[in-house]
Amino acid sequence: MSVYYDFDEVDAFTVGAVGEPGARVFYLQARRGTVRVTVKCEKQQASAIAQYLRRVLTDLPEPTDKPIAAAMELSPPVEAVFVLGPVGLGYDRTTDRVLVQLEEVLELDENGDPVEDEDDDRGHLRVFLTRSQAAAFCEHTDEVVAAGRPACRWCSLPINPDGHACPRMN
């Protein structure tokens, strides 16, 4: 059974990580009133969403307000309704809102082809963000990503506490 959430507006849209650097699990979360939807994602997916939103925001007027920092924290309990697959992003000029559409990852067979399912309903989360919420998401994502393992200055791969086998340093 799939889940489908569609928010024309949200109180918060954020990213967070649970666990120690090197073993963190990333989540995206949308909240509206008492409804909370959490989606498990990869760090690179969260970063890519923030990069795209930042590009969209450069063509728009500067946001006038910012959500409070506490709204950017994950709201417990953190239980993912699905794992993130395809992401759709856009901007609606009529409402001056940024669209973020998240879909559940497709199950693949051993050949990498999508598994055909009679109930081909994937989980789906669609939110519209204000420019302020989008800007706050970008800033918060940068902070969450940077709180992990430091990147190697030569190859950009993360450095573990016990060292790092850099492919560029033979």
Image (spheres, rainbow, N blue to C red):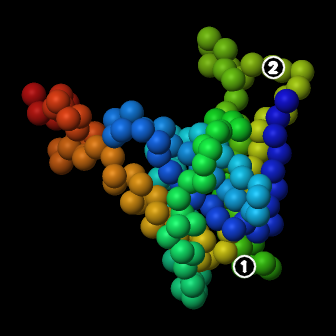
Determine the residue positioned at 42% across, 38% down: 19
> Which quadrant is the C terminus positioned in?
top left
> Which quadrant is the N terminus positioned in?
top right
Q: Give residue 92's quadrant in the image.
A: bottom right
Residue 5 in picture, x, y percent from top left? 81, 50
| Image side of residue 160 versus residue 133, left or right | left
Residue 24 in picture, x, y percent from top left? 42, 38
Label 2 element class: loop
Q: Give residue 22's quadrant in the image.
A: top left
Check disc 1: other Cα within 10 Å, few if <14, some if 14-19, many if 20+: few
Report the residue marked by disc 2: 116
Residue 53 in picture, x, y percent from top left? 56, 65
Q: Which residue is at the front of the view, 52 or 37?
A: 37
Determine the residue positioned at 57% across, 58% down: 14
Kind of residue at disc 2: Glu
Report the residue marked by disc 1: 96
Q: Which residue is at the front of the view, 82 or 18?
A: 18
| Image side of residue 22 versus residue 92, left or right | left
The tag earlier along the polypeptide, 1 or 2, is 1
Determine the residue positioned at 62% across, 11% down: 110
Residue at the outermost right position: 118
Determine the residue positioned at 67% across, 56% down: 30
Label 1 element class: loop
Q: Give residue 149's quadrant in the image.
A: top left
Q: Marks 1/2: CA distance?
A: 38 Å
**Residue 154 visible in the shown view:** yes
Residue 62 in picture, x, y percent from top left? 54, 85
| Image side of residue 159 versus residue 65, left or right | left
Kind of residue at disc 1: Asp
